[in-house]
């Protein structure tokens, strides 16, 4: 998620404020990663880049990389929505005060954009968390896979299923609570 | 102090400023009047390069910019120009995520790099000047329109501008709130601040301005001492404009 957030922010800035070629590349990146299945991307990176081309990527690293690159495209759009929602007057007021464009972005635009983007980002954080179950296809054992193995052993899908769901819920809920706390701190 | 020569600006096919000349001495208060779309706001926004003029030259104190030259594209020159101007917007444009005090401190801390304690003292002094010491820790959303505009004035003054550009500073305000902003501007004028203000409030212009400039179709149609321009308008368009405002004489 850290990868997705930081890379996503970079993409959004490139798309909103970058020079033309950069803008174009960011848009292309976002379209490609948003428009193709996550599963396919994971196969491509792990079986394609790591195994076929011999990149030094463990299954875990490939999983983190794929999820990060994919969600970055989504986060970029969340950030862009936030940036574009801020009235132009904010930029003008900051520039008129003598703030440099970089300072304007950092001090005035981004804090406000983050506040607007946060609910969408939280959504994605929880979705990412649940999507992490697909990494089992490259042999990683995560929560859902763990559930499957154990319930097959125990012959109990319902009880363990509810337990597993509760774990997902608890972690997702913690994320929502955390995000709400940040929203309150960013105020207005 | 200010010297504008032959300023031109077009948006697509529309010529908004069609060769505007204007001079203004330090301490002089000038009101820009004219019908909507005559280029008043654009002229103001060209003075701090929020709009880039297509042609003409601009001198503000020791900063001189010739539109269209390579130097005009230099960001540092633009920044120097902005350091010498303060701008008051019709819609205030306070930073909503920062308190009144933080709004005023923003530029001293992040542009002038003043130590925090100095910026704090400066900002508190300016908030006191606009009568808002007790609102320092309020967010803009917790302030009335008049209070927000007064914070915006304090914020602009924090950079110690040589000229204050006011773009219809009271147009978004109720009549009762209008007066508190006008009072602050009047005080500034009496203290010798150079003001260039776009306004629809002819009564206020009469009250505060030394000179009035009437702009129409991107040109200065008439300009002169306030009383002469408002009481004995020479140009038929100005006569018509003043007539429409049903301006009560004297």
Image: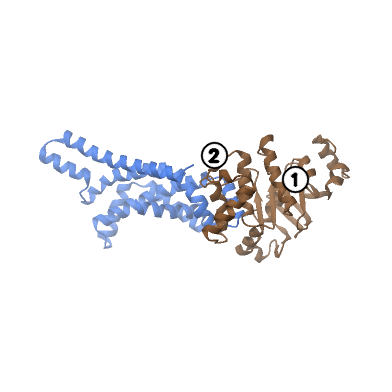
* Chain that the image shows in blue: A
Which residue is pictured at 35% across the width and 41% down the height?
A177
| Disc ID at residue B38 | 1
Q: Which of the 4 quarters of the picture holds residue B38?
A: top right
Which residue is pictured at 39% across the width and 46% down the height?
A35
Q: Which residue is mark 2?
A: B142
Is B26 on the left-hand or right-hand side of B70? right
Q: Please, which chain is the residue tagged with disc 2 on?
A: B
Residue B86 in view: yes
Q: How many marks?
A: 2
Against A20, residue B231 (above or below) is above
Front-lying residue, B104 or B25: B104
* Circle 1 crowding by C-alpha within 10 Å: few under 14, some 14–19, many from 20: many
Colouring chosen for the image of the structure: by chain
Question: Residue A115, how many percent across, how many down?
Answer: 45, 45
Against B93, residue A103 (above or below) is below
Chain B tint in image: brown
């Amino acid at each position: 998620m850290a990868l997705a957030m930081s890379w996503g922010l970079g993409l959004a800035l490139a798309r909103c404020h970058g020079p033309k070629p950069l803008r174009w590349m960011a848009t292309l990146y976002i379209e490609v990663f948003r428009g193709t299945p996550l599963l396919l991307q994971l196969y491509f990176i792990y079986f394609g880049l790591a195994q076929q081309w011999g990149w030094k990527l463990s299954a875990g690293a490939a999983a983190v990389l794929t999820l990060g690159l994919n969600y970055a495209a989504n986060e970029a759009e969340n950030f862009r929505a936030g940036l574009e929602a801020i009235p132009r007057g904010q930029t003008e007021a900051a520039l008129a005060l003598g703030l440099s464009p970089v300072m304007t972005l950092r001090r005035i635009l981004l804090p406000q954009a983050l506040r607007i983007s946060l609910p969408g980002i939280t959504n994605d954080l929880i979705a990412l968390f649940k999507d992490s179950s697909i990494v089992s296809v490259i042999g990683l054992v995560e929560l859902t896979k763990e559930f499957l193995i154990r319930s097959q052993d125990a012959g109990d899908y319902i009880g363990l299923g509810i337990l597993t769901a509760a774990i997902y819920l608890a972690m997702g809920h913690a994320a929502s609570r955390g995000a709400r706390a940040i929203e309150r701190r960013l105020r207005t | 102090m200010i010297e504008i020569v032959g300023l031109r600006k077009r948006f697509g096919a529309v010529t908004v400023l069609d060769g505007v000349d204007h001079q203004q001495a330090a301490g002089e208060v000038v009101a820009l009047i004219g019908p909507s779309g005559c280029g008043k706001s654009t002229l103001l926004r060209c003075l701090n390069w929020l709009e880039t003029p297509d042609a003409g030259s601009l001198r503000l104190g020791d900063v001189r910019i010739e539109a269209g030259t390579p130097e005009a594209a230099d960001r540092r020159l633009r920044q120097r120009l902005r350091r010498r101007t303060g701008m008051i917007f019709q819609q205030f444009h306070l930073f909503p995520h920062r308190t009144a005090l933080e709004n005023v401190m923003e530029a001293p801390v992040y542009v002038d790099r003043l130590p925090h304690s100095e910026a704090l003292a400066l900002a508190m002094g300016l908030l006191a000047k606009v009568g808002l010491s007790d609102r320092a820790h309020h967010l803009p959303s917790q302030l009335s329109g008049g209070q927000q505009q007064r914070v915006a004035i304090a914020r602009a003054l924090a950079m110690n501008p040589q000229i204050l550009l006011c773009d219809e500073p009271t147009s978004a305000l109720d009549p009762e709130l209008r007066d508190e902003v006008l009072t602050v501007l009047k005080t500034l004028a009496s203290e010798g601040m150079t003001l260039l203000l776009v306004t629809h409030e002819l009564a206020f212009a009469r009250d505060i301005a030394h000179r009035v400039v009437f702009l129409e179709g991107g040109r200065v149609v008439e300009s002169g001492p306030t009383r002469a321009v408002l009481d004995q308008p020479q140009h038929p368009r100005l006569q018509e404009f003043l007539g429409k405002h049903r301006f009560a004489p004297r």
